[in-house]
Image (cartoon, rainbow, N blue to C red):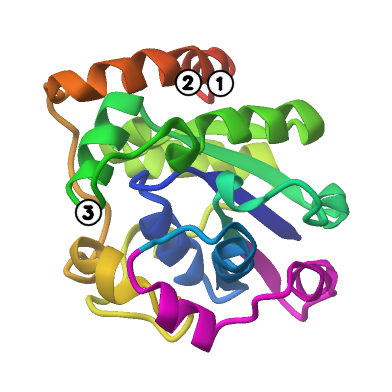
């Protein structure tokens, strides 16, 4: 089985990668299209130079890697906004596509703490809905996972046709060999974790200049929220 997990940034996506990576029957890939996205878009992201120097930048080559057979199940962490027009997506037809969502107010507040002035393109909701429209798949909300990790992971495993493995609930602190080089900037909290953190609190209050971005993102979140696992 190949799982393509589509998620915007700041959305429990790395913790989910560590969760599946804790299973003996899975290998994982961390955002393989990030470097091609940076190379093609020219986007000025943190650690851009290091990412381009360390990771494969050709989208077709990365797509071939994603399409290959593997000796174990494969979990691929993907950001939908990395898939620029012209990037191959046919490999995803052979995957179990899963969509990890989070309320955009939480995403925006967390993202803005790491990178200033996020835009709708940066947080991936529009692109995620497009990929869902193309491939369908299972939708799961990260807030629900944090509130009930075992219950929601059991539901997710059932939905994709896997047995649940209790190993998914914990992992050792620290970085992983599979981490992208960008982990040094983005993964501090998850590197300090040994499992899923607890229930999230109330929605954050956003700065006034972020209110428009929230209004733009909410319809896309609501569309996927309507079909999420419960």
Q: Which mark is residue 221?
A: 2
Q: Are marks 1 and 2 in contact (CB under 8 Å)?
A: yes
Question: Does the rendering let one see residue 179?
Answer: no
How many numbered marks, from 0 up? 3
Circle 1 sits on which residue?
224
Q: Residue at horizontal 43%, vertical 21%?
A: 217
Q: CA distance from mark 1 to mark 2?
A: 5 Å
Q: Is residue 204 above or below residue 30?
A: above
How far from the left and from the top, in percent, is residue 202? Answer: 13, 21
Q: Which residues are magenta?
A: 46-75
Dot 3: what SS?
loop
Left or right? Give the position of 66 relative to 34: right
Please name the residue shown 42% across and 52% down the image.
Answer: 13
Q: Position of residue 82 (x, y in %)?
A: 59, 53
Q: Would you say 172 lies left or right of 97 here?
A: left
Q: Split into 4 quadrants, where in the image is the N terminus? A: bottom right
Given residues 229 and 77, the one toward you in this image is: 77
Q: Quadrant of residue 11?
A: top left
Identify the mark nearer the N-term, 1 or 3.
Answer: 3
Q: Is residue 111 visible?
A: yes
| Residue drawn at 43 percent across, 38 percent down | 123
Can you identify the residue that label 3 sits on? 114
Which callout, 2 or 3, points to the residue nearer the camera?
Answer: 3
Q: Residues within 10 Å of mark 3 (few under 14, many from 20)?
A: few
């Amino acid at each position: 089985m190949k799982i393509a997990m589509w998620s915007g940034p700041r959305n429990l996506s790395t913790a989910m990668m560590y969760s599946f990576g804790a299973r003996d029957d899975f290998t994982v890939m961390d955002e393989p299209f990030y470097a091609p996205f940076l190379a093609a878009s020219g986007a000025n992201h943190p650690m851009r130079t290091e990412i381009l120097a360390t990771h494969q930048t050709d989208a077709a080559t990365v797509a071939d890697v994603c399409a290959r057979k593997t000796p174990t199940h494969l979990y691929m962490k993907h950001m939908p906004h990395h898939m620029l027009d012209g990037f191959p997506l046919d490999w995803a037809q052979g995957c179990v596509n899963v969509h990890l969502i989070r309320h955009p107010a939480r995403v925006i507040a967390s993202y803005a703490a790491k990178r200033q002035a996020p835009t709708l393109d940066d947080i991936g909701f529009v692109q995620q809905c497009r990929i869902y429209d193309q491939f369908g798949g299972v939708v799961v909300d990260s807030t629900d996972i944090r509130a009930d990790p075992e219950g929601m992971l059991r539901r997710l495993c059932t939905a994709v046709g896997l047995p649940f493995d209790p190993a998914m609930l914990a992992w050792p602190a620290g970085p992983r060999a599979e981490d992208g080089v960008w982990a040094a900037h983005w993964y501090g909290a998850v590197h300090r974790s040994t499992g899923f953190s607890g229930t999230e609190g109330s929605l954050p209050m956003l700065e006034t200049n972020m209110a428009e971005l929230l209004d733009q993102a909410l319809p896309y979140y609501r569309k996927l929220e309507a079909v999420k696992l419960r």
